[in-house]
Image (tube, rainbow, N blue to C red):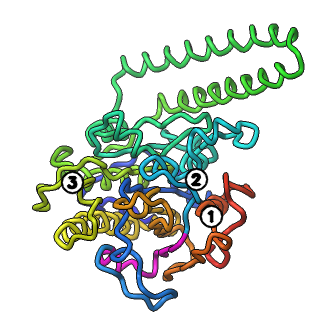
C-alpha cells in the first residue's frame, strides 16, 4: 500500500503508530468483508438490468455504480427460499430464521450465524476489533427486529453502534492510563472467573451421564471460546490506536451520518482495525434533506403509484451513491481487490412483503466481475443465495464446504 494514497484519501490525515508491520501484512494475503443491508429491499424495475451478461445497461436506481462496472456483479433470482416479509429480513446474511435454527439444533449447530460473523470467527483474532456492526438508526425493539442481520453462532444479535462519534472514539481515541488499567483488571477478573468455573465444571462432569457429558462438552467449548476472546482482546491494551485527524464533523442528519459512517468504515479497513464490517441502512430515516415528506417505510409500500416511486427512487439512488463513494475510496486506497463488498436485503419487494429474487450486488474481492448474472426462477431449479455466500467464504480463505442451506458454489465467479 502506498502511504501517500491513504494519507490523502477521504479528506483525512492518518498517522500510523509504528505500522512497519504493513510489509508483513501484505504477504499475509489479507482478506476483508463488508456487508451492507437495506431493510426494505429495492424496487426491482429500477434495480435489475434488463439484459444478462456483460453488455447490460444500468437502471436508474443503480446508475451511480456505473463507473464501477468492471468491479461489481449483479445477481438476479438468488434468495433463501423463505418467506415472512419483514420477519425474514434478519435472515439476510444467514438464510435462517432464528426459530428455525433453535428448533433443529442438531442440524444447525451454529444456530443462525451470519456471514460476517462466520468470517469474523476465522479472522477476527488478527485485529483490534473482530467485527463491527453499525447503523445510523434510532433503534426501538421494532426496528431492531426488522433490521438486525448480524448474529453470532449462539443466535445472539450483535450489538449495533448507532453514533458515528462512538465509532470514531472506539477506533481512534486513545484510552487514558486509568481506563487501560481498569480494562486490564477486568480482563484478569473475567479470566479468573472462567478458570474457577472451568475447574468446578470438570469435577461436576465426572458425575454426569454420557448424554449430559456431551452437553457439558458444548459448555466447555463455549468457555474456551470466551477465554480465547479475552486473551485476544487483552493483547491490544498496550498497543496504541491509529491517530486520525478527521476533517469532517461527526454529527448531522441521518443521511449525513450514513456518509460519515462510510468514511469511518473505510478508515477502519485502512488502519486494519477490523476486517469484518456490517452497515445497516436505516429503517426509520428522516428524508427531508431529499425533499421527501413521507417515511421510508411508507414509500416502500408504493403500490406502483408514480409519485411515490419517484420519491422511492431518490432514496434508493442515494443509497447507491453512498455505496459508489465507498467503492471509490477502496479503489483509491488500493483495498478493493482484497475487500469483498456485499450489498443486498432480506426483502425484495417491500410493497408486497416478498422475499424472493433478492437485490444482490457483490463488488471487489478479486472476483470475475462485470456481469449481470441471471439464475433460474423456477422453484425446482433455484440456486440458494447461500451458494454465493459459501463462494465468498472460500474466496476469503476459509476451508468450508457448506454454509447453512447451501448446495454448492457459484461457478465461474471466483
In the rendering, at what x and y percent does residue 208 appear?
85, 13
Mark 2 closeness class: few <14, some 14–19, many ≥20 residues within 10 Å: many
Residue 118 in percent (x, y) is at: 61, 47
Q: Residues within 10 Å of mark 1 (few under 14, many from 20)?
A: many
Mark found first going from the N terminus, 3 or 2: 2
Counting labels gives 3
Q: Position of residue 385 (x, y in %)?
A: 58, 63
Residue depicted at x 85% and y 22%: 211
Q: Position of residue 134 (x, y in %)?
A: 37, 44
* Mark 1–mark 2 distance (CA, rounded to whole Å): 9 Å
Secondary structure under the numbered disc 1 in the rendered image: loop
Q: Which residue is mark 3?
A: 255
**Proximity of marks 3 and 2: CB atoms separated by less than 8 Å:** no
Q: Which mark is residue 95?
A: 2
Residue 140: image quadrant is top left
Q: Which mark is residue 384?
A: 1
Distance (Cα) linking label 1 and label 3: 33 Å
- When the figure is inspected, residue 285 is found, relative to residue 328, above or below; the finding is above
The 10 Å Cα crowd at callout 3, few under 14, some 14 to 19, many 20 or more, is many
Residue 351 or residue 91, whichever sits in front: 351
One can see residue 4 in this view: no
Q: Which residue shows up at 67% across the image and 52% down it?
A: 404
User: For residue 98, which numbered disc appears in the image?
Assistant: none
Q: Name the image quarter holding the C terminus.
A: bottom right
Q: Which residues are magenta?
A: 62-77
Amino acid at each position: 500500500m502506498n502511504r501517500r494514497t491513504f494519507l490523502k484519501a477521504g479528506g483525512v490525515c492518518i498517522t500510523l503508530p509504528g505500522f512497519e508491520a504493513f510489509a508483513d501484512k501484505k504477504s499475509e494475503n489479507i482478506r476483508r468483508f463488508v456487508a451492507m443491508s437495506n431493510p426494505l429491499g429495492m424496487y426491482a424495475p429500477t434495480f435489475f438490468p434488463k439484459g444478462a451478461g456483460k453488455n447490460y445497461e444500468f437502471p436508474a436506481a443503480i446508475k451511480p455504480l456505473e463507473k464501477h462496472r468492471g468491479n461489481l456483479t449483479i445477481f438476479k433470482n438468488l434468495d433463501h427460499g423463505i418467506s415472512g416479509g419483514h420477519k425474514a429480513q434478519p435472515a439476510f446474511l444467514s438464510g435462517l430464521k432464528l426459530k428455525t435454527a433453535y428448533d433443529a439444533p442438531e442440524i444447525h449447530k451454529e444456530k443462525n450465524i451470519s456471514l460476517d460473523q462466520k468470517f469474523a470467527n476465522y479472522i477476527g483474532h488478527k485485529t483490534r476489533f473482530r467485527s463491527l456492526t453499525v447503523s445510523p438508526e434510532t433503534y426501538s425493539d421494532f426496528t431492531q427486529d426488522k433490521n438486525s442481520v448480524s448474529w453470532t453462532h449462539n443466535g445472539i444479535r450483535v450489538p449495533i453502534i448507532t453514533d458515528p462519534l462512538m465509532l470514531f472514539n472506539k477506533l481512534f481515541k486513545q484510552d487514558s492510563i486509568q481506563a487501560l488499567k481498569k480494562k486490564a483488571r477486568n480482563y484478569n477478573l473475567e479470566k479468573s472467573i472462567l478458570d474457577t468455573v472451568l475447574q468446578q465444571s470438570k469435577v461436576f462432569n465426572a458425575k454426569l451421564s454420557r448424554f449430559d457429558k456431551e452437553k457439558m462438552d458444548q459448555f466447555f467449548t463455549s468457555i474456551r471460546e470466551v477465554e480465547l476472546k479475552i486473551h485476544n482482546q487483552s493483547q491490544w491494551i498496550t498497543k496504541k490506536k491509529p491517530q486520525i485527524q478527521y476533517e469532517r464533523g461527526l454529527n448531522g442528519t441521518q443521511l449525513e451520518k450514513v456518509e460519515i459512517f462510510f468514511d469511518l468504515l473505510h478508515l477502519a479497513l485502512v488502519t486494519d482495525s477490523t476486517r469484518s464490517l456490517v452497515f445497516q441502512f436505516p429503517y426509520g430515516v428522516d428524508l427531508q434533506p431529499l425533499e421527501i415528506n413521507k417515511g421510508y417505510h411508507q414509500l416502500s409500500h408504493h403500490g406502483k403509484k408514480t409519485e411515490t416511486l419517484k420519491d422511492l427512487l431518490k432514496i434508493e439512488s442515494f443509497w447507491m451513491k453512498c455505496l459508489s463513494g465507498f467503492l471509490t475510496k477502496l479503489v483509491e486506497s488500493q483495498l478493493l481487490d482484497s475487500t469483498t463488498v456485499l450489498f443486498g436485503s432480506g426483502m425484495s419487494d417491500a410493497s408486497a412483503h416478498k422475499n424472493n429474487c433478492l437485490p444482490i450486488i457483490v463488488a471487489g474481492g478479486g472476483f470475475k466481475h462485470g456481469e449481470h448474472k441471471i439464475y433460474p426462477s423456477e422453484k425446482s431449479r433455484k440456486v440458494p443465495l447461500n451458494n454465493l455466500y459459501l463462494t465468498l467464504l472460500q474466496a476469503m480463505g476459509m476451508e468450508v464446504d457448506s454454509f447453512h442451506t447451501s448446495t454448492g458454489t457459484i461457478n465461474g465467479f471466483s
